[in-house]
Amino acid sequence: MNDTHSKVVAYILWIFGFMGAHRFYYGRPISGTIYFFTLGLFLIGWFVDLFLIPSMDRAADANYASGTTSYNLAWILLTFLGVFGLHRFYLGKWLTGILYLLTGGLFLLGVIYDYWTLNQQINDKNSALFSLR
C-alpha cells in the first residue's frame, strides 16, 4: 500500500488547523487558504476536520507517489522551519534553500508558494526516481 502521508503528522498540523496547515498537508491548497483567512471556517470546519482526516489521508495516499523523499519530514520542515529553507535543502534544492535562508523564506512569499506546491514537488521527485529504476 502507498502510505505517503501520516495521520499523526496530520493531527499535529490539525492543532494549527484553524490556519489550514493540515489541509495544505493533504494537498488541498484552496480550502487551506480559505481556512487560513476564516480561522478554520470560524472553527466549525476545523472541528469537523477532526473526523475527516482519515478520509483525507486515504485520498492523499492514492494521489501521491511514495519514494525516498518523505512527505512527512518535508512538511514538518516547511511548517516549523520554512523561513530557513530547510525543506528546500531536504529536497536537494540547494540554491533556493540558501536564498530562503538569507531572505526569510523569500520574505515569506516563497513559504506560501511551497505550502501550495510542496506535495507536487515531492511527488515529482519521487516519480522521477521511480522512472529511473
Image (cartoon, helix red, strand yellow):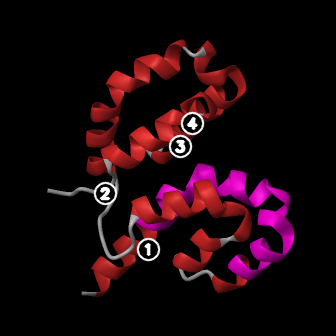
In this orientation, which residue lies closer to the viewer: 84 or 94? 84
The label shown at residue 125 is: 1
Provide the residue designation for mark 4: 16
> Quadrant where the C terminus lies?
bottom left
Q: Mark 3 or mark 2, which has the lower sequence index?
A: 2
In this orientation, which residue lies closer to the viewer: 78 or 113? 78
> What secondary structure is found at the residue carrying circle 3?
helix
> What secondary structure is found at the residue carrying circle 2?
loop
Q: How far apart are marks 3 and 1 (CA)?
A: 18 Å
Residue that appears at 34% across and 35% down: 56
Does the CB distance between marks 2 and 4 fall below 8 Å? no
Does the CB distance between marks 3 and 1 fall below 8 Å? no
Q: Distance between the residues labelled 2 and 4?
A: 21 Å
Judged by depth in the image, the label closer to the viewer, 1 or 2, is 2
Q: Which amino acid does label 1 sit on?
A: Lys
Q: Mark 3 or mark 1, which has the lower sequence index?
A: 3
Judged by depth in the image, the label closer to the viewer, 4 or 3, is 4
